[in-house]
Image (spheres, helix red, strand yellow):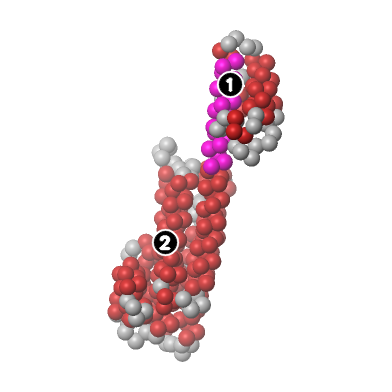
Amino acid sequence: MTDHQVILHSALGSGLLKSLSEQPLYDLCRVQVADACYLIDQCWLRIHRDDINKDLAGMKDLGSMCIQTMIHEESIFQYASTDTTARLAHWVRMYSGYYSVSERDAHAGYIMACAVKALGALASWMQIADQEAWYHVSEPPTDWPKDLYCQFVAMQVDPDKYIEVLDQYTLSLEPITSLLCLNNDELRSIAVRAIDTVARKKGGIISGMERNDEISLRDAAIVKQGRHYRAAGMSKRNVATKVHAWLQREVAKPPKQRPDWIALETEKPLTRKSVETILKRNLVL
C-alpha cells in the first residue's frame, strides 16, 4: 500500500488528523493540514448526502472508487484537462472502474484524491525533516519533553525545502481550481482558499529569509569592523563604542551612499549594547 493510500484509508476513518498532529513539525503545517482535511471531509459528506440510502457495500465501493481515483489522478487530469467536453466524471469512471457513480460523486472523489496528495506531500516532508534533524547523532533522544523535541526539529528545518513542500501542496490542489468542469463546484472555493493561504505563508517565509540575510550581512560588517579595530591594537573595552560610532555614521549617510548591507528602511542604528552582543557572539570581544 502506498503512502497516499494509507493516508486515504486513514482519512476515511477517524485517525488522520490525530496521526499527523503527533508529528514534531505539525505546528508548521497545522493550517495546511486542517484545510486539506476539511476538503476531504466535505467530499466524503457530499458522497454520503447524495444518497443517504447507500448500503454498506455501496459505501465501500465509493471508498474504493476514491482510492482508484487517487492512484490514477495524474492520468485523469491529463485527459480531463484536454477534453473539450469537460468529462472529468467520465475519466474518473474509466480509471476507477466504477461506471455507475454519479457526476457529483465522481467529482468529489477526484477532489478528495487531490487533497490526499496534498496531505501526502506534507506528511512525507514532516517525516523526512524529522529524520534529517538527527543525522548528527546515532538516534533521536527519547527522554526530551515533547515541546523541546519539536522546537529543536523546527530549528533544523531548511526554509528552501519548507517552501518546496508548500509548492507541492499547492500543485496537488491546483487541478481542482484549473479544471473548467469544477468551476461551479462548491468544493472549489475551499481549495482556492487553501491555495491563497499557502501563498501568504510562503510570502512570510521568504520575507523572513530575506530579513535573516540582511541581518547576517549587517552582523558580518560589524564583526569585520570590530576585528579591524582589534588588529590595530585597540583595547577590547573601547571596541564596542568605536564600532557603534562607526555604525551610526554609516546609517546617517544618504541612502545612495550607504553600504549594501544596510537595509533601505533602516532609520536608526543598533544600540551600543546590541553591537556589543554581536561582537561577543562572534568572539571579537
Q: Which structural element holds mark 1?
A: helix
Residue 233 placed where, x, y %? 60, 9
Residue 3 part of the magenta-drawn span: no
What is the quadrant of the N terminus in the image? bottom left
User: Relative to residue 94, is residue 211 drawn left or right?
Assistant: right
Residue 218 visible from this viewpoint: no
| Residue designated by label 1 | 225
Q: CA distance from mark 1 to mark 2?
A: 46 Å
Residue 224 part of the magenta-drawn span: yes
User: Label 2 crowding class (10 Å Cα cut-off): few <14, some 14-19, many 20+?
Assistant: some
Q: Residue at x 41, y 40 (%)?
A: 135
Q: Residue at x 64, y 15 (%)?
A: 236
| Residue designated by label 2 | 171
Identify residue type, mark 2.
Leu
Identify residue type, mark 1.
Gln
**Are the two marked residues, 1 and 2, in contact with CB atoms closer than 8 angstroms?**
no
Residues drawn in magenta: 210-229
Q: Is residue 139 above or below residue 122?
A: above
Residue 207 placed where, x, y %? 55, 46
Nearer the viewer's eye, disc 1 or disc 2? 1
